[in-house]
Image (cartoon, coloured by chain):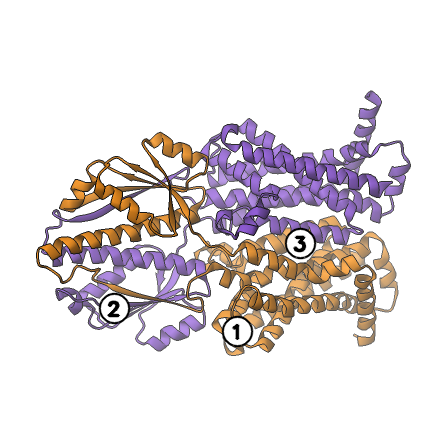
Chain colours: A orange, B purple
Amino acid sequence: MSPRYVFAVVRKEIQHILRDRSTLVLVLLAPTALMLLMGYALTMDIQHVPIAVLDYDHSSTSRDFVQQITAGDDLDLYAQVSSMEEIEALLMRGEIKVALVLAPGFARDFRSLRGMPLQIIIDGTEPQSGAFAVEHVGWRAEEFLNQALSAQMGALGVTQGISQPIDLRIRAWYNPSLKPRVDMIPGLISMVLGFPALSVALTLAHEREHGTLEQLMATPITRAELLLGKMIPYVLVGLVNVILIPLLAMLLFRIPFNGNFIVFFLLSAVFLFAILGMGLIIGVFMKTQPAALALSFLLIFFPGFFMTGIFFPIASMPEVMRMEALALPGTHYAIITRGVFLTGVGLDVLWPYGVMLAGLGVIFMGIAGLFFRKRLG
Amino acid sequence: MMAKWRRIWSLSIKEFIHLRSDWWLPVFMLIGGAIELLAVGWATSRPITNLPLMVLDHDRSAASRSFVVNLHNTEIFNLEAEVYGVAVIEDALRLGEINAAVIIPPDFSSELSSPAGRPIVAVILNGAESIPATAALRAIEGVTREMGDRILVQRLGLQTEEFEGFIPSLRVWFNESLSEALYTTPAELGLMLEFTVLLFAALSFTRERELGTLEHLLVMPFSTLELVIGKSIPVVLVGFIDFILMLGVTHWAFGVPVRGSVALLLTLAFVYILVELSKGLMISVMAKTQHQAFLLVMMLGLSDFMFTGYAAPVESMPQVIQWVANFIPAHHFLAIMRGILLKGTGMEVLWPHVLALIVLGLFIGGFSMRFVRRSLS
């Protein structure tokens, strides 16, 4: 393998990218731009969930209870309704996410503490708000009960032992308020870095479409030199984004970067090698650019989004799918990015994932090289 | 008039002949998409389980053991072997091996049996993976509250029959069994559909231009409108078959119900496909090369996905993003799909989304026609 030939291909490819400014901007900035948009969309802050109340009791206790439930910023009283049909209509139209039904005799049951039925109805088509509401209604109800209990026991002269007997002290490391954005933005870097891989697949298919690949093959450049030369410019494109994205994450979204940047940069280069290997395989197998795009979506982006443990924990997947997840470079890279951004670990912890990525890269490159030879010969 | 339709028809035939030489591309996109939807849906639409948890039990009493057993019974955790030191937990968290750890103090049972004792149970969560951490937190809080309520009753010297707090009962409407598939798979279907339509629409003009065959078309006696309609028919057909196929997958493989009118759903899916088609055509005439067009397709497809409510409900996003969501066809289509499939609603509720979809369609369609006209003449 001659570096001179590799470099010649690299130069040709870079000229291709530079020839047209709009292509340059797209190729270079697509990952960072997408990251910017997703970062904003993930800035979720569930508050003011609209809630409807059906109070069959009409007592001062039930009114106090509703007051307590909707006192904060989390749950807003949207409507007092008088029938289940109204609740149904409001849920249908999506105007409320949650409804609370207080049975007749609520105040009486509450005075004697004989179990107050509290029916919570949530909209199952939107689980996040529902789960949030259930949790918050639970807290408020407990507060309400404890206050009433203290008052009652105080009247009886009992002042001790009426608080929750187990004191839970909760600490979340690396992301104290458990904001999804904090771990999803580092996790999604693996997905947006699929763009250079898409580009490399498209350029290979482009050469095939225009018949210029044959011309290249007629030159003394070997196939390995050609593949490597095609890859290097897009590794560089990827690395530009590897520098831009942490800046974006830290400055705009206030994501901490606790690890070592050099480690992150090195492991990102290894990841790009692996994911671009996938891109090369796609480019080698697909004869046209639309086909290369379709396969990139099915192999890189769609699984990269859903199967790499960013939104759904890999531990909860069925065995077979866990194996598939481990064959995706993004799974290992998501662990690495969360590690350097949040946990702040270094190579001593992350080296096995780096080795896995390098191994996957070598396998992918091997497959690409092997079939490249066959399909042109 | 007849001659006009004949011309359009002959154009469509030409497109189909193109597709025949590349017949496998739509087939591959249709079958591949459906299979992938099946695989991803199967892997990720299930309750969160099997989360690695470490328990450090300093007490080793009957009470502490029953606490651990209760944690185990939630079926959310995969209990790691017993640990004997905090250092082990800290290491495991740093390595990302566990999602949560519970530390039970040595005085757990003695505090609980004394009348006013409050043992402090420490919970450490791994915030670097916020979704499993939140699930773990909810489960641990639930177990603690249940155990605490029992002890509270004993302390107050009440009979269990005499005292009961709130008896919350949860009803999840539109999704009684709380199946995750009911809200995740429609969003995944939406992404796959949008991508498929955009891909085929985007390649319509870019490809001909890049391969130099567009000039041939332009010298023929077609009007721009005829050209666009002829190009669009195969795209709409592929998109529609894709939608029906994937709807079948979500219905029969994941039990997503169709509670509303199937005819309405198919009609609105048709409208949605037309809107995405005009987006694709616009990309197709704006982009100079297939490479540019396809990068844009991927970016649009992935960013629109953030507005389908998969990762976060749109209502909880920042105000600006919610405003932007109104201009995203996929956002309205998902609202329509969830409404018809899960809630069984019809036009009387869905009309704002349908209206938005139509307005967006006319707007984007008009724009893209102007673009097509200008760039083709």
Q: Amino acid at mark 1?
A: Leu
Q: Quadrant of residue B213?
A: top right
Q: Nearer the viewer, residue B201 or B358?
A: B358
Answer few, some or many: residues within 10 Å of disc 3's Cα (few below 14, many 20 plus, some between 14 and 19). Answer: many
Q: Quadrant of residue B97?
A: bottom left
Circle 2/circle 1 CB separation < 8 Å: no
Lateral position of residue A322 relative to residue B75, left or right:
right
Of badges 2 and 1, the one in the foreground is 2
In the image, what residue occupies the spot 52% across and 33% down? B350
Of residue A324 and residue A73, the one placed in the foreground of this image is A73
- For the point 61% across and 59% down, the residue is A36
Picture disc at residue B120: 2
Q: Amino acid at mark 3?
A: Ser
Q: In the rendering, at what x and y percent does residue B57 appear? A: 26, 70
Give the position of the N terminus of chain A as an image quadrant: bottom right
Task: Look at mark 3 in the image and give the residue it sits on.
Answer: A296
Asked if residue B263 is positioned above or below residue A266 in the image, the reply reads above
* Amino acid type for the residue under numbered disc 2: Ile
The Cα atoms of the two marked residues, 3 and 2, are separated by 52 Å
Question: How far separated are the C-alphas under marks 2 and 1?
Answer: 34 Å
Q: Position of residue B48 (x, y in %)?
A: 41, 54
